[in-house]
Amino acid sequence: MLKLYTCYKCCFPFKADDRNLPPRCPACNCGPEWFLGEPYNPEEKRRIHVDPPEPEEGERDVFDISYHVAKRFPAGTRNGRLRRFVFEYTDAPRARRDYAELLDWDIVDCEGTDAAHPEMFCATGPGNPNWEPSVPSFIYGFLKDASTDPTGMAPFFMIEVDNIEETAARAERFGGRVLRGRYEANGQQYAVLADSEGNAFYIWETPATVTWDEPESQGG
């Protein structure tokens, strides 16, 4: 009989015939004593949810990869979280067409953008409409005119931080550089840093309007 199994050790779901059950979990390699099985129904679009394991004692061991326990971020901060990607373009119509046709992304102009050098939202897939209401998506990003980047470094990612100046100072202590200091765009505060390996990235300061009740603000 075909069943839907979930491994209690790592929460990995998989389907298998119970007469030919894998001897080990495909994800974490633990034995079948950890498996929970239910009849498989292809019409039921769900997966079994089990409570993820917690560390048995003491602090979470970040080097234990038998099951990497999820990090719980402190309350009242989203510092360090990767938020969006940024891809630069030199030809806006071509970039819009190519990403839409290559990856089936929804690509729409940001509100109030410059028509000659548009900044465009890229919605990369299904998402929670209460999460990022403008462009519900797994993760979204922007297409941005390369000529608007004064650093010439084409930063690819945007990381949220508590404070721009404090983060910039730490970056410099760790061998990085400030490529562009604090600036404002669309009412938001940004800067551009490079790490010690030369990778450029945007940092975005958590807005004062955050209530900490948002799904993305929860510490896990």
Image: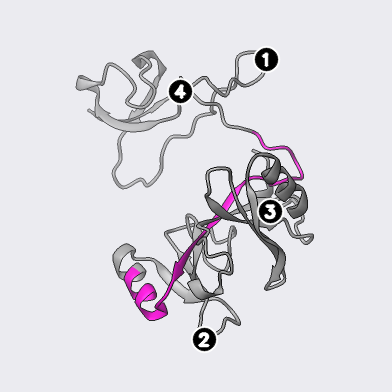
Model colouring: one colour
Q: Nearer the viewer, mark 4 or mark 3?
A: 3
Q: Nearer the viewer, mark 2 or mark 3?
A: 2
Does residue 102 appear in the picture of this structure? yes
Rounded to the nearest angstrom, the CA distance separating label 4 from label 3 is 29 Å
Residue 156 screen position, x and y as percent: 50, 57
- Give the class, few, some or many, for how many residues have Cα within 10 Å of label 1's Cα (few <14, many ≥20): few
Amino acid, disc 2: Ala
* The disc label shown at residue 8, or none: 4
Q: Nearer the viewer, mark 1 or mark 3?
A: 1
Task: Say whether residue 89 is magenta.
Answer: yes
Residue bearing the label numbered 1:
58
Q: Nearer the viewer, mark 4 or mark 1?
A: 1
Residue lying farthest left?
Answer: 20
Quadrant of the drawing holding the C terminus: top right
Rounded to the nearest angstrom, the CA distance separating label 2 from label 4 is 52 Å
Q: Magenta residues, as a range?
A: 72-98
Q: Is residue 36 above or below residue 99?
A: above
Residue occupying the point 63% across, 41% down: 175
Rounded to the nearest angstrom, the CA distance separating label 4 from label 1 is 21 Å
Lower sequence index among marks 2 and 4: 4
Residue 65 screen position, x and y as percent: 47, 22
Residue occupying the point 41% across, 17% down: 34
Amino acid, disc 3: Glu
Amino acid, disc 4: Tyr
Residue occupying the point 54% across, 57% down: 84
Lower sequence index among marks 1 and 3: 1
* The disc label shown at residue 35, or none: none
